[in-house]
Image (spheres, helix red, strand yellow):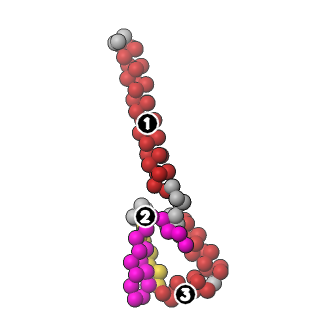
């Protein structure tokens, strides 16, 4: 299971605590439940779906890069909108 780079894990004698720093979500997986997940295919698939739903699984090699690109694109879009508004405003005022 490849976890996202945003996941922190802390193991104890009773199990493992997982914390998703991106979504501020956490859960505790007991050793007993982990054994059940490992031995039962149906429960393993449900657990995998739970991890996927709560963004614990790796989104791939370029997870951070995709986030940064999205962030940069949003900033460019906002700046272009501001530029267009200022250009229109200058045209109305006939400012060179």
Q: Is residue 13 magenta?
A: yes
At x 43%, y 45%, the residue is 71
Residue 83 position within the rendered picture, expressed as x and y whole percent measured from the top left: 40, 26
The earlier-in-sequence mark between 3 and 1 is: 3
Residue 26 position within the rendered picture, expressed as x and y whole percent measured from the top left: 42, 71
Q: Is residue 22 magenta?
A: no
Residue 61 position within the rendered picture, expressed as x and y whole percent measured from the top left: 52, 59
Vertical relation: 82 (above or below) 35: above
Residue 94 figure quarter: top left
Residue stretch rendered in magenta on the structure: 1-18
Q: Secondary structure at mark 3?
A: helix
Q: Residue furthest front?
A: 61
The one of 24 and 65 positioned closer to us in this rendering:
65
Residue 47 position within the rendered picture, expressed as x and y whole percent measured from the top left: 57, 75
Q: Residue furthest right?
A: 41
Q: For mark 2, what is the residue?
A: 6
At x 47%, y 46%, the residue is 69
Q: For mark 3, what is the residue?
A: 35
Asked if marks 3 and 2 touch (Cβ < 8 Å), the reply is no
Q: For mark 1, what is the residue?
A: 76
Horizontal side, residue 85 vs residue 57: left or right: left
Q: Secondary structure at mark 1?
A: helix
């Amino acid at each position: 299971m490849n976890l996202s780079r945003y996941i922190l894990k802390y193991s104890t004698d009773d199990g493992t605590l997982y914390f998703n720093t991106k979504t501020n979500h956490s859960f505790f997986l007991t050793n007993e439940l982990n054994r059940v997940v490992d031995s039962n295919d149906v429960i393993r698939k449900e657990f995998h779906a739970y991890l996927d739903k709560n963004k614990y699984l790796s989104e791939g090699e370029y997870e951070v890069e995709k986030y940064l690109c999205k962030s940069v694109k949003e900033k460019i879009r906002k700046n272009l909108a501001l530029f267009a508004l200022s250009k229109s405003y200058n045209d109305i005022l006939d400012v060179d």
